[in-house]
Image (cartoon, rainbow, N blue to C red):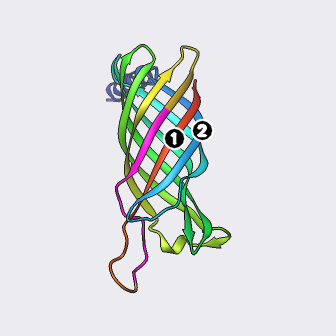
């Protein structure tokens, strides 16, 4: 019985090791050009950054799955009575992207993401209580991987869920969504 159990464990270990050869890990960082949509009446985009880790699981020569964990700055510029205010929001975003390689190195990527709100400030005032703690959306873009491990990405993140967690005193509560253009550079080991 012990030999059968040890054999089964050995077979599973070799199977995992064989799959691990198809997994690449990496890091990335880049620029966010963020804004808010839905019923939000913004006065412009807010520049920020994102940084985090990626993993790419090759399923075949042309298809892979790429989960990521990113610290990402979101938000928008608002103008109220002539005073401009920057709404700066920080999220931990977790996109899970399907990647289709059109040719060697060049891929299209798309998939859902979930974001966890870490902070929200309007100038120096904490406004986190006015926003929901979880954001859902879709991300899509293009990536190019160089043979040495360096890669470049450009993507659009479109929020689908309403992040507004306040009630309007008069009228309906506006729906607010996060949107961002991301340009990244990274390295996969």
* Residue situated furthest right in the rendering: 124
The residue under the point 54% across, 27% down is 152
In this rendering, the answer to whether 2 lies above or below 118 is above
Which residues are drawn in magenta?
Answer: 154-168
Q: Is residue 47 left or right of residue 166?
A: right
Percent position of residue 51, x then y: 60, 42
Between discs 2 and 1, the one toward the N terminus: 2
In this rendering, the answer to whether 185 lies above or below 81 is above
Q: Quadrant of the C terminus?
A: top right
The crowd level at tag 1 (other Cα within 10 Å; few <14, some 14-19, many 20+) is many
Task: Let me know if residue 68 is in the magenta part.
Answer: no
Q: Is residue 99 left or right of residue 45?
A: left
In this rendering, the answer to whether 151 lies above or below 140 is above
Residue at the spot of label 1: 182
Task: Let me know if residue 161 is in the magenta part.
Answer: yes
The residue under the point 48% across, 40% down is 68
Which labelled disc corresponds to residue 75?
none
How many numbered marks, from 0 up? 2
Residue at the spot of label 2: 30
Residue 64 or 167: which is nearer the viewer? 167
* Residue situated furthest front in the rendering: 82
Percent position of residue 94, x then y: 46, 47
The residue under the point 59% across, 41% down is 31
Distance of mark 2 from mark 1, alpha carbons? 7 Å
What is the chief secondary structure element of the magenta stretch? loop
Which secondary structure lies at badge 1?
strand
Percent position of residue 102, x then y: 35, 18
Q: Is residue 165 left or right of residue 185?
A: left
Which secondary structure lies at badge 2?
strand
Q: Is residue 108 left or right of residue 85?
A: left
């Amino acid at each position: 019985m012990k030999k059968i159990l040890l054999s089964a464990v050995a077979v599973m270990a070799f199977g995992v090791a064989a799959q691990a050869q198809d997994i690449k890990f990496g890091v990335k960082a880049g620029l966010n050009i963020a804004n808010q949509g839905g019923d939000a009446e913004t006065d412009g985009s807010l520049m920020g950054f994102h940084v985090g880790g990626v993993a790419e699981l090759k399923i075949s020569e042309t298809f892979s799955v790429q989960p990521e964990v990113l610290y990402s700055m979101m938000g928008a510029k608002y103008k109220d009575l002539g005073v401009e205010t920057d709404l700066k929001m920080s999220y931990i975003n977790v996109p899970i992207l399907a990647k289709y390689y059109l040719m060697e190195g060049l891929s299209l990527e798309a998939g859902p993401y979930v974001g966890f709100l870490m902070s929200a400030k309007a100038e120096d005032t904490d406004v986190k209580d006015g926003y929901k703690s979880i954001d859902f959306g879709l991300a899509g873009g293009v990536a190019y991987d160089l043979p040495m491990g360096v890669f470049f990405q450009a993507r659009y993140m479109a929020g689908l869920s309403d992040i507004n967690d306040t009630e309007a005193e008069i009228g309906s509560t506006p729906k607010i969504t996060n949107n961002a253009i991301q340009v990244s550079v990274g390295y996969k080991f």
